[in-house]
Amino acid sequence: MRLDIGGWFESVIDWMLVNFAWFFDGAAWLVNQIVGGVEYVLIGLHPFLLIAVLAAAAAALTRSLGLTLFSAVAFLLIVSMGLWVESMSTLAVVLVSVLFSLAIGIPLGIWAALNSSVSAVVRPILDLMQAMPVFVYLIPAVFFFGVGRVPGIAATIVFSIPPAVRLTELGIRKLDAELLEAAMAFGAKKSLILKDVQLPLAFSSIMAGVNQVIMLALSMVVVAGLVGAGGLGGVVVQGVAQLDTARGFEGGLAVVILAVYLDRVTSGARSLGDVLRNRRIRKEQRAAAGTPAVAAVS
Amino acid sequence: MNASHLQALTTDHREEAMNPEVPFIQVEHLTKVFHPAKSRPLRLLPKKAANQGFVAVDDVSFQVQQGQIFVIMGLSGSGKSTIIRMLNRLIDVSDGSITVDGKDVRALAPAGLRAYRNQTINMVFQHFGLFPHKSLVHNVAFGLKVRGVDRETREAKAAEALALVGLGDRIHAMPDQLSGGMKQRVGLARALATDAEILLMDEPFSALDPLIRKDMQELLIKLQRNFKKTIVFVTHDLNEAMYLGDRIMVMKQGKSIQCGTAMDLLEAPADPYIEEFVAEVDRSKVVTAGMIVRPLDPSGAPPGDPDAGAVRVSDATVLNELLPIFAAGTERVEVVDQQGASVGHVTAEEVFTALSPKGYSNAS
Ligand SMILES: Nc1ncnc2c1ncn2[C@@H]1O[C@H](COP(=O)(O)OP(=O)(O)OP(=O)(O)O)[C@@H](O)[C@H]1O
Ligand SMILES: [Mg+2]
């Protein structure tokens, strides 16, 4: 006996298409506006100015001279390959997808960490989302949103949410049980415990999730090129279709440059919390050294 | 000197009048049954066995007077942590009642429970439970932050509490820059900063080196002289229990098997299990002059000094420190309490009697 699972899935999609067309149209319009806006800024700025900004961001977040120089040189290379506009268009798509993924994934991860039933429901869904071959997402995405950037973004979001949820949940759950007890023993509300204890201590784990989300989103770029998302994905797809090795390689190289840059910068930001905290503490310590120490109380 | 002494006495009386014999913490028939996690078992076990659960605390009753240190002592797994966590309801009570200052703790609604934890009952943890991302002053101020005290006030208060435990010069350090003993001082300061009347201490000194542990015990005694908190202290070290405890409850497999003063346990262990514990105790270091003192004859307590020239010792002096005095030929020493008032005498003979072991078998 053959179960027609594929057929059922298709009819679910058809039903949604009929009943929620307004929703998909609206969402597509909104996403297009947002990406268009980001893209407008990235492309509108003079490349050299933007490269300076990107290199400065790398310097601020990683405090590494090597990476700062690398990013300046690598982005100039992109300009010289004539792929600047495509790269910025891809960057805009990645940034917007990541933003949506995080906006969905981090709160979901927090919820799953605080509520075991949510976690039990969410976990198998995440497994499914991650294990499903990525191309499969493109089919319904195209049905819902037509061709262009939006289905690519939709597929990218679905594909890149899991690490945001997982690493947020993990970061909160792995908190030392005694610390949680200590916070509760002083009568703290759940919301204060979350804000004051759980989230700060989960920060580096959450940032690791952000980093993975970005990497997954970039890896979808080329795939999304198949449905006409343009950008570097489009360049690579075109190179493949025309068997143009040179063009394909240049497109691929630009993707790699973006990937290395985003990876290093976001993993540098992981320790940003520590850096800021240490700076604040040093400031406090200096301030305390300036004024007479608190008088000992009998 | 005499006048202030008199004043001390009258204030004592007034306090007693305010707190009549009603215990501050009253626990009755406290029971905790842990049920295995509801993971939908495959029903391979008979239904009954699967539902029974594990009795971690079994019908335990005790009382703690205000200002006392009450020690819960027992081997690992005997249910000490479970009891102490039921007192502030970090663990839910299965059965029995807990009354603190006349209030039924089990009946507290969530908001009331938070207020109770914040204002009445604080806790010190075995592994310190300090927030690694907060400096000492912010750790100590946490309870006040929860209470909604403004930043400046709570930080001043926290700095004050840190000064009390000897860390006044390190208030901006981070927890990971401290040694274990210092961390636990912070834990203590955090519980002091809120002015809660009850301190729960779950093996607070077990993770420390013996010398540091001794320091911390002395610090606790010193603070206790000033603050007169009501302390519930968990330990598995009988020496510590006897040194600190006004009263000691010994637990075994979830049940309370004896509850009394250190002397009660030493003189009349209620169980071979306690006798075994007691055999390990160095009596000369835990029995104090105050424990064995013969009270003054109430009829003829003359205001003047009956034996002028007698050696006077504090009631907290351990017998070990009395031995050299007797070795020097003194017949008896006068014991005085913290206010310097005489409470009675101790003779060499009484000291030797107190030091000689008495077992469960010879006691009966
Ligand atoms: N959440 C729980 N679920 C099931 N059983 C538990 C739970 N917490 C404690 N127990 C069991 O209850 C018993 C008492 O535990 P408890 O932690 O109170 O012991 P303890 O006297 O504090 O021991 P220790 O000296 O090791 O801290 C132990 O046998 C323990 O295994
Ligand atoms: Mg314990």
Image (tube, rainbow, N blue to C red):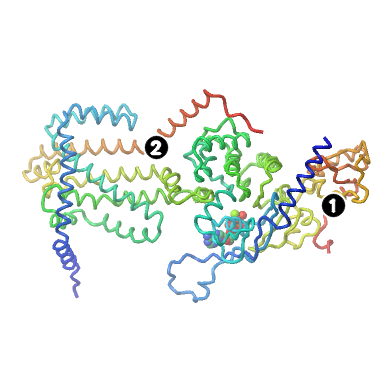
Q: Which quadrant of the frame does ligand 2 lie within?
A: bottom right
> Which residue reaches farthest top?
A290
Q: Is residue B270 left or right of residue A297?
A: right
Residue A273 numbered mark, or none: 2
Q: Position of residue B81 (x, y in %)?
A: 60, 55
Q: Position of residue A8 (x, y in %)?
A: 18, 68
Q: Residues within 10 Å of mark 2 (few under 14, many from 20)?
A: some
Q: Is residue B109 left or right of residue B17?
A: left
Q: Quadrant of residue B62?
A: bottom right
- Structural distance between the alpha carbons of marks 1 and 2: 61 Å
Identify which amino acid the numbered label 1 is placed on: Ser
Camera-near label (1 vs 2) is 2
Determine whether the residue tagged by mark 1 lies in a helix, strand or loop. Answer: loop
Please report the residue visible at 43 percent of the width from the left and 30 percent of the height from the top: A279
Residue B356 numbered mark, or none: 1
Please report the residue visible at 53 percent of the width from the left and 24 percent of the height from the top: A291
Question: Which chain does tag 1 point to?
Answer: B
